[in-house]
């Protein structure tokens, strides 16, 4: 398939490289400031041998878009509508990559439009093992084409409408963004105590690994679920100088206690 990338940030870079490696031809990279950098990165990858003929052209203005089978609009959420208004590609397929932006924001750009949303945290310089992709389309034909393209770069592809995509977007914030902030505060606390969060990395990895085998509610550990009040008091004393951490410690402890009390009738 011939593909044009619109945007040159994290998502355009990571998906663009994967699409090229999967045998698709990236024709152009269109972006106001950094198109050339991504074009050069894709050309360098191509020279390594995976797609020796690829030579994406860098352009700044959507007026200079050439005909392609698929236009991948990977720009900031707030710019998707604006960019869609600038491209007119008749019958070609146009997809965006945003979790919380509706599908039909693209309807001005083409009759055939869809969504290819990576349910993964992407940065230009990283290359995660698996990028789950949530796909949608303006009709069944488009949905099945977007699904087919998605399957060339990911083993985890799921059809989702706007509402379902938003549920996963919320899930992503809850399981990724919020815990990461907790990791930041834990890191600062441990540094203050002359320690490093590195010693906790295996524990963090094991917590996630277990979820492949058990539902999270079945693998809750710690003093709150055990009803170990003596340990909870010791922790609270140590956290007295850290009011933000103490507030969360108490909030999570209370939530865990009441959840398991409701579920199993223990530790009210
Ligand atoms: N990164 C992630 O982990 C992730 C995961 C899933 C979905 N997404 C979604 O994917 C989309 C892109 O995210 P990203 O992380 O790749 O963003 P990003 O790294 O910040 O890149 C944004 C891109 O948008 C371009 N842009 C901004 N305003 C524009 C405008 N008015 N007209 C044309 N281009 C414009 C920028 O161009 P210049 O650099 O040339 O200025 C840049 O290439 C967003 O909808 C985001 O929600 C991101």
Image (cartoon, helix red, strand yellow):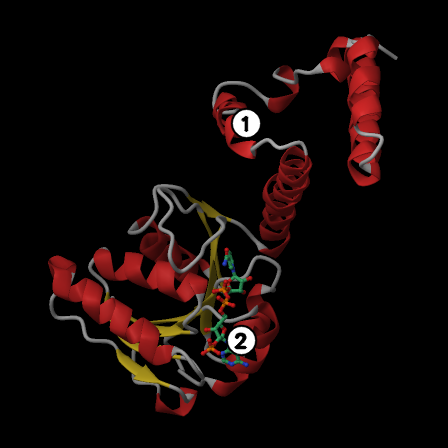
The residue shown at (37%, 59%) is: 14
Say which quarter of the image contains residue 91: bottom left
Q: Is residue 43 above or below residue 164?
A: below
Instruction: Provide residue 138's location: percent of width, then percent of height.
Output: 49, 65
Marks 1 and 2 sit apart, C-alpha to C-alpha, by: 48 Å
Please rate how many residues cluster around mark 1, counting C-alpha atoms within 10 Å: few if below 14, some from 14 to 19, many from 20. Answer: few
Is residue 69 among what the camera can see?
no
Residue 208's mark?
A: none
Side of 234 where 139 appears, left or right = left
Dot 1: what SS? Answer: helix
Residue 56 vs residue 2, the one in the foreground: 56
Q: Nearer the viewer, mark 1 or mark 2?
A: 1
Quarter of the image that includes the C terminus = top right
Q: Is residue 6 above or below residue 134?
A: below
Residue that carries the numbered disc 2 in the rendered image? 107
Side of 129 where 205 appears, left or right = right
Say which quarter of the image contains residue 102: bottom right
Please rate how many residues cluster around mark 2, counting C-alpha atoms within 10 Å: few if below 14, some from 14 to 19, many from 20. Answer: some
Precedes in sequence: disc 1 or disc 2: 2
Residue 173 vs residue 137, the one in the foreground: 173
Quarter of the image that includes the N terminus = bottom left
The residue shown at (17%, 65%) is: 46
Residue that carries the numbered disc 1 in the rendered image? 200
């Amino acid at each position: 398939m011939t593909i044009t990338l619109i945007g040159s940030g994290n998502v355009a870079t990571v998906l663009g490289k994967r699409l090229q490696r999967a045998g698709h031809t990236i024709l152009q990279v269109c972006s106001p400031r950094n198109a050339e950098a991504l074009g050069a990165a894709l050309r360098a990858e191509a020279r390594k041998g995976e797609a020796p003929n690829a030579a994406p052209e860098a352009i700044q203005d959507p007026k200079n878009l050439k005909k392609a089978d698929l236009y991948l609009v990977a720009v900031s959420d707030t710019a998707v509508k604006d960019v869609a208004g600038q491209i007119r590609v008749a019958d070609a397929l146009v997809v965006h990559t945003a979790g919380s932006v509706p599908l039909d924001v693209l309807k001005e750009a083409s009759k055939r439009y869809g969504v290819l949303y990576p349910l993964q945290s992407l940065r230009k310089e990283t290359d995660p093992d698996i990028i789950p992709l949530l796909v949608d389309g303006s009709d069944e034909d488009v949905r099945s084409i977007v699904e087919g393209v998605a399957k060339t770069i990911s083993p985890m592809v799921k059809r989702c409408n706007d509402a379902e995509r938003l549920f996963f977007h919320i899930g992503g914030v809850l399981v990724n963004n919020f815990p990461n902030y907790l990791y930041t505060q834990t890191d600062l606390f441990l540094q203050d105590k002359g320690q490093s969060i590195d010693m906790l990395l295996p524990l963090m990895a094991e917590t996630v690994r277990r979820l492949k085998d058990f539902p999270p509610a079945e693998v809750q550990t710690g003093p709150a679920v055990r009803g170990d009040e003596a340990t909870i008091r010791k922790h609270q004393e140590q956290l007295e100088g850290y009011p933000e951490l103490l507030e969360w410690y108490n909030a999570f402890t209370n939530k865990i206690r009441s959840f398991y009390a409701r579920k199993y009738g223990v530790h009210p």
